[in-house]
Amino acid sequence: MTTETTSSVLSSRDAATADPVTPRRPRLALPFAGRGRQPASAALPRPPEPWERWALVGLLVATALLYLWGLGASGWANSFYSAAAQAGSESWKAFFFGSSDAANSITVDKTPLALWPMGLSVRIFGLSSWSILVPQALEGVAAVGLLYATVRRTTGSAGAGLLAGAVMALTPVAVLMFRFNNPDAMLVLLLVGSAYATLRAVEASHVGGRAVRWLVLAGALVGLAFLAKMLQSFLVLPALIAVYALFAGVSWQRRILHLLAAAAGLVLAAGWWIAIVSLWPATARPYIGGSQHNSILELTLGYNGFGRLDGSETGSVGGGNTTGGQWGATGLFRMFGSEVGTQVAWLIPAALVLGLAGLWFARGRSALPVRAGLTLWLGWLLVTGLTFSFMAGIFHPYYTVALAPALGALVGIGALVLWRHRDSLVATGVLGFTTALTAALSYELLARDASWHPWLRYAVLVVGFVSAALIVGVHHLPRRFGIAVAAAALLAGLAGPTSYSIATAATPHAGSIPSAGPSSGSGFGPGGGPGGFGGTPAGAANGTGPGGTTGGTTGGASPGGLLDGSTSSSTLTALLETDASSYTWVAAAVGSNSAAGYQLATQQPVMAIGGFNGSDPSPTLAQFEQWVKDGKIHYFIAQGNGGFGGGGPSAGGGTSAEISTWVEATFTAQTIDGVTVYDLTTG
């Protein structure tokens, strides 16, 4: 399609008034759609009507309440990232590199963009669970609003945008991660922004606008997402590239040039930080956590890159394989399995069916924006979902929050297209089938926790099946009754994930592997209690109360472990704070989580030997001995009963084990509130 032809189509009177996805004799309006419904083919959307503005405000306020209510109950949440945020609030160098401590011994095992809002928040408002967790909640609200804007602009329907935003907001894993401090919240926000910019580029290419500017912005947003969670951000690229290549209203030569410009924007947005870190002298910066050779490129391509796909990530504590392992069984139905299903699977079949059916019914040049939108979100869902399903390396169920925007958009757009074709028996048949399929899946997912309101799964099944049958013949029903049937179908489809989302928001979460649902906390998969993987209750495990206050607990302490932060006590905290200004690090411990709790309790640098897993060769035994000799480290806090722990045997030559053995042989142990401590200034 040439630019001139498309422009003439979009500017014609028919294109401005005809609805390409509405049947000739519609019997009732789309639920939630006003009488000023915008055609999907319009070049520019109409201004929102008052009810649309209020409905959007209602959606965003409800989302904010869901994501913010009782947020402080989770304490430090993931103390690994909380400690890095605290470090960044004390040192701009630690802020820039994403260091685990303000003395810059080692970085976290991710690029630091997601840490920067937390670090700034702590610097401004002081250290508390609220100052750490609120930025992620606000990022979630922004992502929901941006998805609404994207879908509304694609379809011209506020109803479709509201439905898309609601589906995303009520996906259990989204509630979990937008109330947590992992990098996924920032990742999702930036990727939704890249989808919006790409579709704006397609739109601009048909009306003589500056499409390349929007496309460069899309590339830059993906590049920034790379600085939040590295190569996972690139999973959306096939969909973004395909949409512009297929639907842009310019010649193929210009499409290629525009895509190259977008690639340049991506490289610039992601590469500036990588280049600085690569060129910075290694002796003058912190060790790159997660790498075995102090290399940001190794971290990017290995541990956080291709190693995640085949399970070959060096320095990992273990992984899965093609048939199953520590990270769960791989395969086509992994997203529906026992560990992942209740997190995100509720509307996956509905999204796929509605997306594909919507493409079929949105045929014709005038429906190009709708087809472009459906193509983008289908590509997003399929590429990301299949990658998660078959990756043999480190995989956690909460990664699936990246699917939530695609699920919302496909359900919102697909339902709109089919509803506008409700005079077609095929369209209503697909709607009915999707409703029944979603109800059956919700019943199965709800049944996995028999104690969780058992009546709900039966209600969902009955309401879903009845509405499915009525939807097939909805064009024969009176208008109001038809709207009621559509509302009942939506209620049946959203009741299950909504109940799990509310339960998720009501449950404190701590540790490194949280999961959504009524009995989740911080376990190694769904069903783990609030204490997590061998941990203690959220808040208590981090030395915080429900209000996010800092300091140690008054009772016993705990050295923490691989997946849970350590717990300090008043006595231990006071010991570490003694003469703290005389030392570079008030203490050292094996593994980032073991160090994190003490650092958060004292707000003083605590060295994380070996990084997150305890498997990074940093520092070496010789370096550690020299730092002790120079009086830079006050205490060494042992793992368990004097032995080393954290990440287990080091892939870097047993460095953490060597240090632990040397400390045990050289210094005298003392036990404080159940924790073994060595004073490195004596001996």
Image: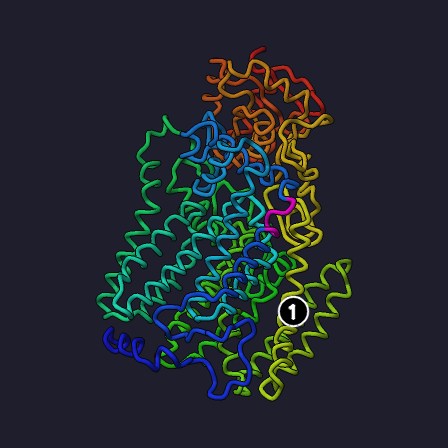
- In this view of the protein, which residue sits in the foreground, 166 or 225? 166
Quarter of the figure with residue 548: top right
Quarter of the figure with residue 676: top right
Residue 279 horizontal/vertical position (percent): 30, 34
Bounds of the magenta span?
Answer: 65-70
Relative vertical location of residue 35 with respect to residue 63 in this rendering, above or below: below
Q: Residue furthest left?
A: 253
Residue 420 horizontal/vertical position (percent): 50, 80
Q: Residues within 10 Å of mark 1 (few under 14, many from 20)?
A: some
Relative vertical location of residue 522 with respect to residue 465 in this rendering, above or below: above
Residue 430 on the magenta segment: no
Residue shown at 28%/69% (left/top)? 207
- In this view of the protein, which residue sits in the foreground, 303 or 92? 92
Q: Secondary structure at mark 1?
A: helix
- In this view of the protein, which residue sits in the foreground, 601 or 536? 601
Q: Residue furthest top?
A: 682
Residue 133 horizontal/vertical position (percent): 56, 42
The quarter of the rendered structure image containing the C terminus is top right
Q: Which amino acid lies under the numbered mark 1 shown in the image of this protein?
A: Leu
Relative vertical location of residue 149 with respect to residue 85 in this rendering, above or below: below
